[in-house]
Amino acid sequence: MRLIVPCRTPSFAAILAVHSSERVSRLQFEPRDQFEQRQKKLEQIQQLGLDPFPREFRWTHTPAQLLEAYGQAQAQDLEAAGVQVRVAGRIVSMRLMGKAGFAHIQGNGTRIQIYVKKDVLGEKGFALFHLLDLGDTVGVRGHLFRTKTNELSIWVEEIFLLSKALLPMPEKWHGLSDVEVRYRQRYLDLIANDKSRQIFVTRSRIIQELRRYFDGRGYIEVETPMMHPIAGGAAARPFVTHHNALDLDLYLRIAPELYLKRLTVGGFDRVYEINRNFRNEGISTQHNPEFTMLEFYEAYSNYTDLMDLNEELFSRLAKEIAGSTVVKYGEYKLDFSKFQRLSMREAIIKYWPAELQPPPTHEELAARGGPSAIGQRYDAWAKSSGAPYTAAKGQLTDGDWTGLLFETIAESKLIQPTILYDFPIEISPLSKQKPGEPELVERFEVYAAGMEIANGFSELNDPAEQERRFLAQLAQGGEDSPKRLDVDYIQALCYGLPPTAGEGIGIDRLTMLLTDAKSIRDVILFPLLRPENPEPQPGQADAQSGEKA
């Protein structure tokens, strides 16, 4: 769709002074011919003395309610009952037959047929019906009956135009297949594609079920700040904004973790938040810069308790949302009643490529310098064989190498639901060390279909150790590392954080799994996209015009 905007923008007062019949004439949208034709119809409707954009309509039923209540009712029973209804919806089909006509209207995802007759509606009402187009929203008053083909329908006694559609619906209601248009104009996607609509209805149900689950376990839901003076809670590049009144740079939340743990210090033993997070990073089928997470904390528990909780939670969600613990995702059938559990080292060994022998041993992966040597051996083979190789950059610790080896070799192969546990300390600055293995921490992630769905751990509650790890992050540097020490958080730990387990679950990816969606953009109503026609920056337009001259 192309928007042609006049060079000089009229004043607000001038716009208000424009006659209502010219209310949209200053903007011209494609397709121009249909846009102009529908504007003419709008004027004709106004000439009938009707408001094409009224303020209200009092309805008694939705189409879905009528089909549920009367879908099995016989014609004679409907005639005897004389069921009077007032229903609203968007016109999705029309056919005229002289002095009568049929149409289907759709409301809230369900359609019902209406029947109009000139001698019932009168001259004015029937003239209005003739001026309607596909996509117009109407209200009707009438009674239920069945047609000769036995279709439940509304015999219309009065019709009301509720909103005139000045642009045609996509592809005459045969669906909207252009992916780019679906994401940019989600309103058209929801009108034309019932599957898209059902994805977002299911997403809402998933969030409801999550709330029901945690509320039932004695958690309380809270809200924490979305603008942070210090970026923290995850290793990610933040978005930066500025507070004018305080003359203060702030960071959009990359995770709510540190605030939620402050609340646990304050005595909220079980707390959760469904939150929006923002990370100034790449975009892919699994990543969007703005995304939704459920994050929760449970005092007096550890990471094994949350592993058990996850198996129960995901099994319950699958049953409630998909009707079974077995969920279809693409070519796979994911069974959420069975979780395999692997340590990160075990996953590397299990999925080590068969062509590269021998696979590393647990002892080699645990030895000082072992992961580095194993990673270099793997990369040498991968580059010669065309296999994926690790994105190793700069000086890496053994823990960094272990994480890279897992991501390169094993992550994409975790198709069935898997709990991956025992991470290197170097890539887990907020997790509690594992007794007897200080190079590891009590951390786990949940995977399915090769995607990370959740991340949890036993929370580090030793303020001195937390300060040491924060300082190590600062010294390491990099775009994803914090730039300042969060002294207030360490001070909060000094008041005593009880033994606590915490976790974040990605709502978007979880919705992908439970709706068989291949891209994260399919489950986010308005995903971030590059502008179609970027506006020139100050001075750019002059420079461009100079170049053309």
Image (cartoon, helix red, strand yellow):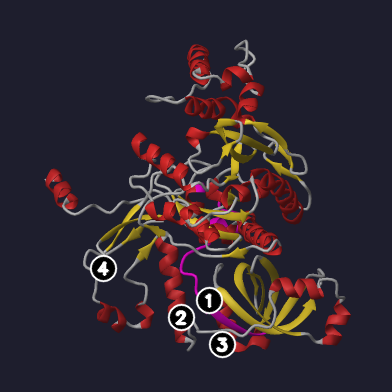
Q: Residue at x 12, y 47 (%)?
A: 546
Q: Residues within 10 Å of mark 4 (few under 14, many from 20)?
A: few
First reached walking from the N terminus: tag 4 or tag 3: 3
How far across and down, in percent of the image, does residue 328 sit?
72, 43
Measured in 3D between alpha carbons, the distance from the residue under mark 3 to the one under mark 1, in whole angstroms, is 11 Å
Q: Is residue 133 magenta?
A: no
Q: Look at label 2 and name its amino acid.
A: Gln
**Disc 4 or disc 3, which is closer to the eye?**
4
In screen coordinates, is 204 left or right of 228? right
In screen coordinates, is 17 left or right of 157? left
Dots 1, 4 in contact, CB < 8 A: no
Measured in 3D between alpha carbons, the distance from the residue under mark 4 to the one under mark 3, in whole angstroms, is 58 Å
Screen quadrant of the N terminus: bottom left
Dots 4, 3 in contact, CB < 8 A: no
Q: Is residue 166 magenta?
A: yes
**Disc 1 or disc 4, which is closer to the eye?**
4
Residue beneath label 3, please?
124
In screen coordinates, is 121 left or right of 407? right
